[in-house]
Amino acid sequence: MFLKRLNGEIRNNMVKNGSSCLLIILLLTAVINAADAEPSAGIFNVRDYGAVGDGVTVDTKAVQAAIDACAGTGGGKVCFNKGRFLCGTIHVKSNVTLYIEAGAVLLGSKNLKDYPVTIPAYRSYTDHYTDKSLIYAEKAENIAIMGRGTIDGQGASFEGPYKVRPYLIRIIECNNVMVKDLTIRNSAMWVQHYLACDNVVIEAITVDSVVNGNNDGIDIDSCRKVRISNCNIISLDDAIVLKSTSDRPCRDVAISNCVLKSRCNALKLGTESNGGFQNIAINNCTVYDTRLCGIALELVDGGLFDLVNVSNIVMENVGCAIFVRLGNRARPFTNVTVDPKNPCSSNFKTGIEAKIPGIGLMRNIIISNIQATGVGSTGCSVTGLSGFDVENVTLSNMRIAFKGGGAAKLVNREIPENAKNYPEYNMFGPLPAYGFYCRHLKNIKFHNVELEFEKADLRPALVFDDVKDLDIFSFDAEADSSAKALIWLKNVTGAFIHGCTVPSNIETVVLFEPDESKNVKVTNNHTASIQ
C-alpha cells in the first residue's frame, strides 16, 4: 500500500515538475505489479525438468521428475504448455495436479516398452485386463488431471490381447480425485479406470476413442462418492460404465448432463458385479447412434443391486432402450483362469480357493422420463431368474418408438433362461413383445408409458411371464389388428390394469392364461379412435 501511495504522489508531482519523474514511476510500477502477481511457488513446468515437447523425444523421465519435485515440496501444479509431450507411464503422487494447457498434448508412446508392468496391491478381476497405463496413481490423495489440453494415447498402434493395450488413465485406491475440462482421445484399451477410489469428480471432459477394441469411455469400479457431469463421450465400447470387479460395492454415484454415443452401451451398470451397485442416480443425458443399449442394468456375478434411479434420458437410434438383467454367470474375481485373448468371456476355470458368488439380489429400480426413437426391433426386457425375482421396478413417463416388423411366430417362442450367459439385450433373440418382455419379477409398475412402431408388428406390446404384483396405469400403445393381444399375461399373480388407452383395431386387449394367472383386474380403460 505504501508503494501505491508513493506512486500516486509522484504522479501528482510529475504534473508539476515535468517528465523527470517518468523513470521512477516506471520502476515503481514494475515493483508493484511484481508484488501483486501470483507467486510461482508450487508451479512446475515440465520443460524446466528437460521435457522437449516436440512429439518425437520421449519425455517420460522429465515429466516424472517434475511430478516428483512437485510432490516433494508438498504439492502443486505440474504444467504442460504448448507442445506435444511424448511419454510412457507416469506416476501421479499425492497433492499433485497435472495441468495440460490449451495447445498442449500429452501423447502416449507407441512403444510398449515405455509402459512397464505395474501390479497394484488391490486385487480385482481387472488383473486379467491390464497391467499397463499412461497415467497411473495408487493410494494417493488430492490429485487432479485438468486443463483445456489433450491426452492422446495413439491406441491404434497396439494390436493383440488385452494386456498389450495400455489404459490411458488408471487410478487405484485414491481419495479426492478430479479430472476436468480435458479432451481424451485414442486409447488402446479402457480410456479411464477408477478402482476402489473415494470422492471422484469427473467434469466437462470430452472423450473420443474409437481406434481400438474395449474402449470404454469411463469405468467407475468399486468406487464410492463419485460425480460425473457435463461430459461428451464417443466410445467404441461402453460410454459410461459402473463395475464392481472386487467385493467392494460401487455406491453413491451421481451421473448427469452427459452426451453419449457408443458402439456398445451408453449407460451401463455391469457386467462385472461382484460387489454390486447401491445408491446410483443417473439423469439428464442424451444418447444417440448407439449400437447396443441406451440403459443397461446388469447383475450377474452376485452382489446387491439396490436403489438405482435413471431419469430424464433422451435416445435416438439405439439397438435397445432399456435392458435389466439378473443373471448367474457367478464368476469370482480372484483365483480364476481365463482366456487371455477374451477374459470377458463366460468361460473360465476356478482355482481351489475361488469364492463362487451366489445369485445376487436386484431391487428398487426406478426408470422414468424416457423418450426414445429409432429403437431396434428386438424389444426391451426386464428379467430375473426362476426363483430369484427382480423386485420393485417402476417404469414411468416414457415414450418409445420401435422400428417394429416382428412376425407372429415370435409370440409363442420359448425364451431360454440363459442364466450363465454374458448379459446383452439381444441374448434371448427377438422377444415375444415388441415393447417390453418381463419375466421373474415381483412388484413392477408401468405408469404413463406410450409405445409405437414404424413397421407393422404382430407381437403384443407387453408380455409378462412369472410376475407377481403388476400395476399398469395410463398405458397407451400402438397395436396391429392381427396381433394376438395388446398385453399378454402368463403365470401372473395379482395384476391391476386400469386407466389405459386401448386401440380400437385390436380384438383382445389383455390375454391371460386362466389356469396360470389369478387375481387379475382390468377396469376403467377406454378405446382410442384410429385416424
Image (tube, rainbow, N blue to C red):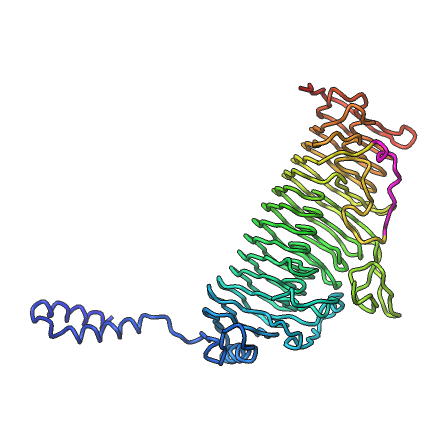
Q: Position of residue 285 (x, y in %)?
A: 59, 46
Q: Position of residue 298 (x, y in %)?
A: 75, 51
Q: In front: 522, or 80?
A: 80
Q: Which residues fall within the magenta stretch? A: 408-419
Residue drawn at (81%, 39%), measured in percent from left and top? 431
Q: In front: 309, or 37?
A: 37
Q: In front: 176, or 404?
A: 404
Q: Where does the C terminus fall, quadrant-wise?
A: top right
Q: Where does the N terminus fall, quadrant-wise?
A: bottom left
> Which of the 4 image quarters holds residue 221?
bottom right
> Which of the 4 image quarters holds residue 36?
bottom left
Q: Position of residue 218 (x, y in %)?
A: 63, 58
* Residue 410 highlighted magenta (yes or no): yes
In this rendering, the answer to whether 460 lies above or below 226 is above
Q: Position of residue 323 (x, y in %)?
A: 74, 45
Residue drawn at (70%, 52%), measured in percent from left and top? 264
- Taking the image as shown, residue 240 lies to the left or right of residue 2, namely right
In this rendering, the answer to whether 184 lies above or below 326 is below
